[in-house]
Image (cartoon, helix red, strand yellow):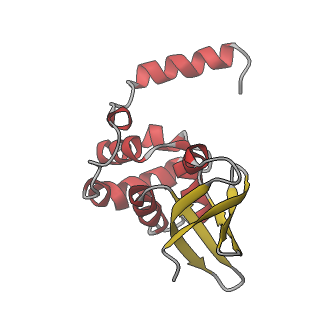
Amino acid sequence: MIALLTGQIAYKSPDHIILDVNGVGYRVLIPFSTYYELPEEGGRATLHIHTSVREDAIQLYGFRTRLEKSFFQLLISVTGVGPKLARDILSNIQPGPLSQALAQGDIHKLSTIPGIGKKTAERLVLELKEKAGKLDLSSLPVTEMRQIPDEDVAEDVISALLNLGYK
C-alpha cells in the first residue's frame, strides 16, 4: 500500500494533482486545505497517502499532514461516509475546529458542511466524539485551535450574506 509520495507537481487543480515520482505520474485526490498549501506546478511536494481500493478503482487521497490523514481515516470509518464525502468535509473544515465540533456535539456546525445532513452529523458525533479527542492536535497552528464562533455570530453572518443576495 502506498503511504507517502514525494515528487514534482506535474498538474494542479483544486480537487486533485498529478504528482510525478521518478517518471510515474500519480493522480492524487486532495482536499482544498492541501491544495492551498501546495507549491505551483513544477514544485516539489510530499503527501501522506490513503489508498482506497474498490472493485472498479484504486484511488489515492493525499494530505499535507499526518493529522489530516488521520481525520480522513476516522471519517471514512463512519457508516455512510465514503472517501469523497470525507474529503469534502476536510475541504470545508480544518482538523482543529472539526475536533472541537465533534467534542462539543455541535450538530448544527457539522450539518452546515455541504453533503452533511442532520442524521449524518449526529452519526459523526456519536461515532467520533471520543476517537477525535484522542488525536494529537499539538501539531496544529494556534490559529486552528481557536474557539468555534458563538452560534449567534454564525447566524448573523449567514443572515448578512443572505441579505446581500448570496444563497
In this view, 65 is above or below 33 = below
At a point 51% along the width and 58% down the height, the residue shown is: 63
Q: Quadrant of residue 92?
A: top right
Q: How many marks?
A: 0
Whether residue 144 sits left or right of residue 17 in the image: it is left
Observer able to see residue 116: no
Above or below residue 53? Residue 143 is above
Q: Can residue 27 be seen here? A: yes
Q: Nearer the viewer, residue 118 or 83?
A: 83
Tell me the quadrant of the picture where the C terminus can be found: top right
Q: Is residue 144 above or below residue 87?
A: above
Q: Residue at x 47, y 61 (%)?
A: 72
Task: Give 38 or 116, whichever is nearer the viewer.
Answer: 38
Q: Position of residue 131 (x, y in %)?
A: 30, 61
Q: Nearer the viewer, residue 24 or 115?
A: 24
> At 32% from the left edge and 35% from the top edge, which residue is drawn?
142
Q: Nearer the viewer, residue 118 or 70?
A: 70
Residue 136 image offset from top left, x and y in percent: 27, 55
Residue 9: x %, y % from top left? 67, 58
Residue 141 location (% of width, % of height): 35, 39
